[in-house]
Amino acid sequence: MAYVCHSDEDRRRLLDAIGVTGVEDLFASIPVTLRRSGLDLAGPLSEAEVRDLLEALAGINRRTHSASFLGAGCYRHFIPAAVRALVSRSEFATAYTPYQAEVSQGTLQHIFEFQSAICELAGLDVANASLYDGPSALAEAAFMALRVTKRDEVVLSAGVHPEAAEVLATYAAGPGIAVRTLPLDPVTGRTLIGEPRLGGRPAASGRDGLDGGDGPGGAGVIVVQQPNFLGVVEDLAGLASAAHAGEALLVVLHNPMTLGVLAAPGSLGADIVVGDAQVFGNSMSFGGPSVGFLTCREAHLRQIPGRLVGQTVDADGRTCYTLTLQAREQHIRRAKATSNICSNQALNALAATVYLSLLGPNGLRELGELCVRRAHDLHSRLCSLPGVIPAVTGPFFHEFALDLPMDDVEFAHAMRARGVDPGVPLSRFGRPGSILVAVTELNPPEALDRYVAAAREILDANRGSGLDRGPICGCPETSAQGRA
């Protein structure tokens, strides 16, 4: 389809309709320091010159390495060469949305296998054909829960990633859905499920805080993250009990890499489980693209967003695949659509499926155990440094928050100057003086040693500045296998 530019008259009519005098007025809310008056582009280049230029620009990027401890929702794991070799095949790279099932059997099959793997991991009945990413999947799940419960309020744990919480708030702003926050225990870092009550009206006697009335009014869903933003492993069974006591649903934003070690959330009472499968065979890639997933109980199947691929047989009895459910406005009456999600992240989902197939259940468990051992080893050693204490004391998987005796951003800058990216400074998320550290199998013992040595050097230099917090933490020593 050809692109036809608007004429001056077309632009004038548009601006008049909006009520502004010029295009510049549309950008008035953007600070002047962030605006460019024009693009300073070089002259035309040959193909070879363009390639050289792009390679030079790419060379400026700083790559993650074994001494990088970044996390906070996007994690660096080893990706076997077989994953990239398989997903780079042309039949996968060029495939698009399987509108015509009869000619899209390969795509439908690998989506079906992705759904099956997610169901097994989450311990639930049905998974959809993937969503854009974890945060958008979380918002879709919250709205799905409200449709099921016919309520109009979301109760959100303060342990949900702040950026995922912003996505949910953006979704909720349009229809006017109320979003209320459950605080974290300041000591353990776990979500408080007692007071304040979760419901809008007085709860029935003996209930633990969720309004149980029928129809609109009151909380229809509790939304939590597992492990939460501070790395703490939440009590999902207790949260599920609190939600169900008030006839609400529990939605869990889960890091699926932990499910080789942690119990399946469905077995603990979660009703809808979502997450980001970036950790399975997908690189960090500057934060995207990624692949979200959503899985639920069969009772809520009709409210699932996006698409669902099913397995069946054809007229000759051969196994084949079809789009079983398409609950979007493009396929059914707009008022009946559950979501406007348009496309699944099929290539990223395929990478996750290939990765899981290569790893297998035992490999996923062993990988999780390795991450746990190394994370607890580093946590113990860092807490032995003067002034460093745990931000919270709850159990953690492979990510943890520390309070530092100095400014967290200054600490991070000093660590990076020594070749170690120490994690995510939490001052940007309202916790000045704290840092979030993630440890994966790609952080070998030598990288842990570099972290501790660099941190000791920086903190020793900082001592005497009046910022020292004093006593060291009483973290239990980890076994020697943490050095594996």
Image (cartoon, rainbow, N blue to C red):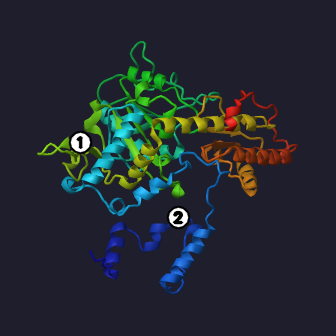
Q: Earlier in the sequence, mark 2 or mark 1?
A: 2
Q: Nearer the viewer, residue 82 or 118?
A: 82
What is the x, y in percent for residue 58?
57, 69
What is the x, y in percent for residue 92?
35, 59
Q: Is residue 138 left or right of residue 438?
A: left
Query: What amino acid does circle 1 point to?
Result: Gln
Tell me if residue 468 comes above or below residue 355 in the rendering. above
Q: Does the rendering let one see residue 228?
A: no
Distance from disc 2 to disc 1, alpha carbons, whole Å, reads 50 Å
Residue that lies at the very extreme toward the right in this rendered image: 464
- Residue at the disc numbered 1: 311
Q: Is residue 452 left or right of residue 14?
A: right
Q: Give me the disc on residue 476.
A: none
Tell me which residue sits at (47%, 42%) in the image: 359
Q: Give me the disc on residue 30.
A: 2
Tell me if residue 133 comes above or below residue 43 in the rendering. above
Tell me which residue sits at (36%, 47%) in the image: 130
SS for tag 1? strand
Q: Quadrant of the N terminus?
A: bottom left
Quarter-of-image position of residue 246: top left
What is the x, y in percent for residue 238?
48, 22
